[in-house]
Image (tube, helix red, strand yellow):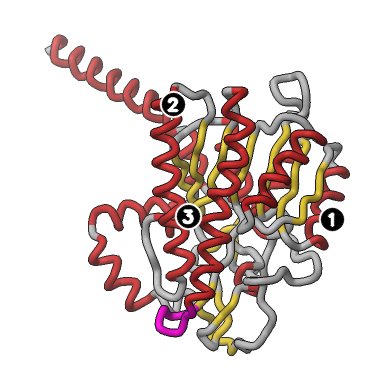
Amino acid sequence: MSEHNGKRPEVVVVTGASAGVGREVVREFARRGAHIGLIARGTDGLEAAKREVEEAGGRALVLPVDVADAEQVDRAAELVERSLGPVAVWVNNAMASVFSPVKDMTAEDFRRVTEVTYLGYVHGTLAALRHMLPRDRGTIVQVGSALCYRGIPLQAAYCGAKHAIQGFTESLRCELIHDGSNVQVTMVHLPATNTPQHSWSKNRTGFRPQPVPPIYQPEVAARAVVHAAHNYRREWNVGLITDVVLAGNAALPGVGDWYLAKTGYESQLTAEPDDESRPDNLYEPLPGDWGARGRFDDTATDRCEQWWFTRNRGWLAVAGLGMAGLALLARSGDRKGL
């Protein structure tokens, strides 16, 4: 789809656009001809993302911004509106994390993760609303995960921020409904994804971190985010494991505590030692273009059968009801025949 509503290219803003899921989301929107505001701190990745958008036939605006700074985010939104046009979709995706037991964390690191991963979403949402509400249209996509509902060991700061995003988004959604607004906010809960996050996040465990299997390629996440931007549902779950974790946590959260106490460390850590003094991106971006994928191509998949079912659950339910109705009619006819 090269044009929004058949008239003009869709204008999209993506935070965390330089690498990982955000980078792949940019590529997916670019394939549709979107014009994209690219927000992240690392200019190397932003410039590479811009080239990819332009090669796909779109326009891109590089915006070196730390989403923890609300004024920077506001200025970026203004620049996008002036340079590319009215923002139709705003994707909040930028994140930071620390792999560490709580007892080894510092207050400063907790604050930084919260400012980026939670307040970054708040700042992006506020900036989007300032432009979308007067026009009474637009979609805000919050990139979430199962960790919005289920905390795991070694990532307390990140899980806390993700839980906060969930609560913030629910409050906002209620207010939009109350006001009769046509602005929409949705969440896309992702499974473990093969991104550079596990190579650049601060790490105090002594071992190289990994996504909790099963691991999906960022292309799976990006397709879901773009679909959610154009097909409203309050929340979208991606990956069967996400459905299982959310359902299990709702039904038996205590079992989840015990299970993760037994498995949550080894499932997130490889046997490879990691140097705790290696550079990380918590306070400053790392140089270079990190791209979308991490180092787990050998164990990651770009297929997600669950996503097909969750996208089509409406007509599948209708088809199921229709088949059940036909079966009842057939049974009724058999009884009459007797």
Name the residue beneath numbered marker 2: 315
Residue 224 seen from this side: no
Q: Is residue 42 above or below residue 54?
A: below
Highlighted range, magenta: 100-106
**Vertical relation: 336 (above or below) 141:** above
Residue 16 position, x and y percent, is 67, 55
Q: Nearer the viewer, residue 47 or 309?
A: 47
Q: Report the amino acid beneath label 2.
A: Trp
Q: Is residue 4 left or right of residue 148?
A: right
Residue type, mark 1 in image: Glu
Q: Quick check: is 61 in the magenta stretch?
A: no
Q: Which mark is residue 145?
A: 3
Q: Residue at x 23, y 59 (%)?
A: 252
- Residue at figure coordinates x 51%, y 56% from the top left: 118
Q: Quadrant of the C terminus?
A: top left
Sequence-earlier tag: 1 or 3 = 1
The image quarter containing residue 18 is bottom right
| Label of residue 47 in the image | 1
Q: Residue furthest top?
A: 336
Q: Residues within 10 Å of mark 2 (few under 14, many from 20)?
A: few
Mark 2 vs mark 1: give the one in front: 1
- Closer to the chain start, of discs 3 and 2, is 3
Q: Residue furthest front?
A: 71
